[in-house]
Amino acid sequence: MEFLVTAAQMKQCDDYTIRNTGIPSMVLMERAALAVADEMEKEKLDMTSVLVICGSGNNGGDGFAIARLLDERGIRVTAAFEGREASLTEETFHQKNICARCGINPCSNYRDHEYTVIVDALFGVGLSRNVEGKYAELIEWINRQHAARVAVDIPSGISADTGRVMGKAVRADLTVTFAYLKLGHILYPGTEYCGKVTRRDIGITADGLRRAAAAFTYGEDDLSRAAPRSARSHKGTYGRVLLIAGSRGMGGAAVLAGRAAYRSGCGLVRVFTHESNRLIVQTSIPEAIVSTWEDENTLEAQLTEALAWSDAAGIGPGLGRGEITRKMIRHVLGNYEKPLVVDADGLNELCSCRELLLQTRAKVILTPHIGEMERFSGWSKADIQNDVCGCAREIADRYHLVCALKDARTAVTDGVRLYINTSGNSGMATGGSGDVLTGLICGLLAQKMTRFEGTALGVYIHGLAGDIAAKEKGAYGMLAGDIADRIGEAMKPAEDRNSER
C-alpha cells in the first residue's frame, strides 16, 4: 500500500519530524538534495551541463543545495534564481548564501546557453495559484529546451492536491519526491507531466499521518488481501454470486461478468438473464447456473428466489433501458440485504429512483463511468473529470454507499477512505470491460471481503489483468474477454502469498 498526501499533509509531516525528532529543516533539505543528485546519476542522465532553476520557497532551497552537490561532484552546473529576494524562506536564504561562498552565484543570462539537464526547483508542492506572467513564460521556455527535465518534488505548475495544471506546468522526464507520493503525482493530468516518479525516504517520520492520509493506492503486495483458500474446502466455502445481466440479444455482457466472477475464485455463479440468452451463456460458461426470465408477470418471484440464494449480487450489465430494468432495480433494492453492485443500465435506470438508495438495506456499490456519473449526478462531464475523487466521495457520502468512479485513475471511496487505482491501460477502453469489473467485484464480495476493500481490490486486479492482456495482445488488439481470462493470472501472487502463511 502506498499512501498519498496533500500539500498540507506533507507540511504536517515536515513539521512533525522537525518538532518531534529534532532533525533540523536544513538537514532534511540536504537529504532531499542528495536524493535528487543521486537519482540523476542513477538514471544516467547526460550531465555535461546542468541548469538548476530555483524559486524563493524551500523548493528553491533544495535546488541551491542540488547545484552545490553537483558542483562538488565535478559537474558543470549553472544556478538561476527566479524568485524574489524579499520572499526567500530562511532555509533558502542560507542555501543561496552557501552556494555563493562556494563560488556558485546565480546567473542572470542563463537562457543564452544550452544545457543537457534542467532541474526545476521553482515552486514544489506549495503552489496555491495559477502560474502567470514571467513564470508562465519561463515554464514555456523550459519545456522548449532540448534537455532532460528533472522536477524536485513535483513539476512546477502542477497542483499537488488535484493534479490540475495551474496555468502552465513543467513537463518533467524525471520527478524525485520525498517521503510520500502526492495526489498530483497520480491523478490526471498531473501524472502525465511527472515522467518517471521516484519516491525517496529522507527521514521524514509521521506514522500517525498514515491513518489520515488523503488516499492510498495498491501494489502487488496487496494482492494478499484476497480471501485465503483452504485445502479443506468446497464450492460453498467461496460464496455464491448472482448476476442479473443481459436483456434480449445482450447475452455477451452476462457472459463476461459471469466469467470474471468465476475467475475471482468464488464457488458458484448464477446468471439471471433473458431466455434468449440461455444458449450463449450455457455454452460460454458451462460452469454457471443459468436462470432465465421471459414472462414479466413472474419476474419478481423469480428474482426473489435468486436473491435469497446468493451471497453477493450484481445488476445492470447488458440489461438495456426501459420498464423491465427499472422494475428489476426497484425490486432488488427493496428486497436485498447483501452486497450489491449496480452498473451500466442498472445505474441508468437508478436515476429515476435515487431515493431508494437511502431506504435499501442492500450494501450498495455503484461503478459508474464518467458518462453514467453525469446522468446520475446531474453534474457536467467537465466538472466530474476535474474532480473525480471529490465527485465519487460526495455520492458515496450522500447515499451511504461505496462508489467506484471509473476513469484513467478510478477512484473508490466510502465517503471517508479513498483508493486511487494505478493499474490498467488504454486497451481496457473497450466494450465489456465494465461488465468484467462487475463480475470480479461480486466474486470478491461473495468470498466475504468487505464492501470497500473488495471493490478497491477488484479495481486493482481488473487493471492488472488488463496489463497482462495488453502485453500479450497489445492495447489495440485486446478485448474485454482477454481481461476476464487473465484475472486468475493476475491473482496468482495472492495464491502464492496466502499459501506461505
Image (cartoon, helix red, strand yellow):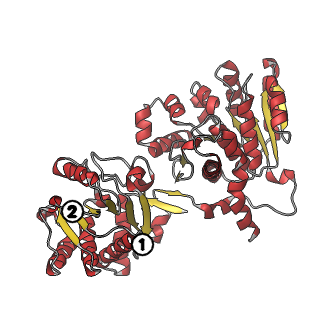
Q: Determine contact: label 1, label 2, CB under 8 Å.
A: no
Residue 217 in the image: above or below residue 481: below
Residue type at numbered disc 2: Gly
Is residue 212 visible in the rendered structure shown here?
Answer: no
x, y percentage for residue 236? 85, 51
Q: Earlier in the sequence, mark 1 or mark 2?
A: 1
Residue topped by disc 2: 55
Identify the residue at image location x=40%, y=76%: 203
* Image quarter of the N terminus: bottom right
Depth check, front residue: 258 or 322: 258
Q: CA distance from mark 1 to mark 2?
A: 25 Å
Identify the residue at image location x=72%, y=46%: 485
Depth check, front residue: 44 or 173: 44
Pointer 2 local density, CA inside 10 Å: few below 14, some 14–19, many at least 20: many
Residue 69 in the image: above or below residue 120: below
Depth check, front residue: 186 or 441: 186
Numbered badge on residue 70? none
Q: Quadrant of residue 233?
A: bottom right
x, y percentage for residue 286? 86, 39
Mark in front: 1 vs 2: 1
Residue type at numbered disc 1: Lys
- Secondary structure under the numbered disc 2 in the rendered image: loop
Q: Quadrant of residue 494?
A: bottom right
x, y percentage for residue 456? 60, 51
Numbered badge on residue 42? 1
